[in-house]
Image (cartoon, rainbow, N blue to C red):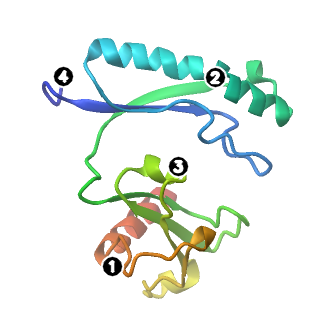
Amino acid sequence: MEYGPGLTVAIRSSATAEDLPTASFSGQHDNYLNIEGETQVLDTVRRCFASLFTDRAIRYWINNGFDHFKISKSVGNMKMVRSDPASSGVVFSIDTESGFPDVVFITGAYGLGANVAQGAVDPDELYMFKPTLKLGHRRPSRRASRRGIPSMPQFQLDPAQINDLLAYLNSIQE
């Protein structure tokens, strides 16, 4: 093992039709955190693939008119990164609700991203206007709070971390 004994991994599933304009299947299939050892990894990968056929997933596919036998699924494993002393989140190159291409949308929350996906916490949501980013402005143009729950008094990400994320996004898009 490259990382030595005691390595824990996340086993994550993804299907080809998870994020569509009319349906989001995110969370319908199983994902597992802190899996350790070859036997547990192999068993968990099998359970991830099998989660395509849980009652919850099948009902969602049927309700949205999808033939689940025509959907491809992948399962990946990745080294767990401790986020309990920090934060986790996602950077989107567009506005995820409207598809507006001129914004960068960053979400962040303290702890594991699974807490956000499960609705246990509301993440900070930062919108940044791309044309002003090109001019060197790095200040978030809007900070949103879903469900009317007050946000933390400060962003989970400091300006340097936001700049790092923007640089990563820029290098991926180029």
Image check: 111 left or right of 17? left
Q: Which residue is mark 1?
A: 159
In which quadrant will I find the N terminus? top left
Label 4 crowd (10 A; few <14 / some 14-19 / many >=20):
few
How far separated are the C-alphas under marks 3 and 1?
24 Å
Question: The disc labelled 3 sits on which kind of residue?
Answer: Ala
Which residue corresponds to the image point at 69% horizontal and 23% vertical from the top-left? 55
Which quarter of the picture shows residue 6?
A: top left
Q: Nearer the viewer, residue 29 or 98?
A: 29
Q: Which numbered tag is attached to residue 117?
A: 3
Image check: 38 left or right of 93? left
How far separated are the C-alphas under marks 4 and 1?
36 Å
Q: Which numbered tag is attached to residue 142?
A: none
Question: The disc labelled 4 sits on which kind of residue?
Answer: Met
Q: Which residue is mark 2?
A: 52
Q: Nearer the viewer, residue 95 or 26?
A: 26
Q: Nearer the viewer, mark 3 or mark 1?
A: 3
Q: Nearer the viewer, residue 155 or 69?
A: 155
Question: The disc labelled 1 sits on which kind of residue?
Answer: Pro
Q: Nearer the viewer, mark 2 or mark 1?
A: 2
Against 147, is 143 above or below? below
Label 2 crowd (10 A; few <14 / some 14-19 / many >=20):
many
Q: Secondary structure at mark 2?
A: helix
Q: Which numbered tag is attached to residue 1?
A: 4
Q: Earlier in the sequence, mark 2 or mark 3?
A: 2
Q: Secondary structure at mark 1?
A: helix
Against 111, is 17 above or below? above
Q: Earlier in the sequence, mark 4 or mark 1?
A: 4
Rendered location of residue 18, percent (x, y): 66, 39
Q: Nearer the viewer, mark 4 or mark 2?
A: 2
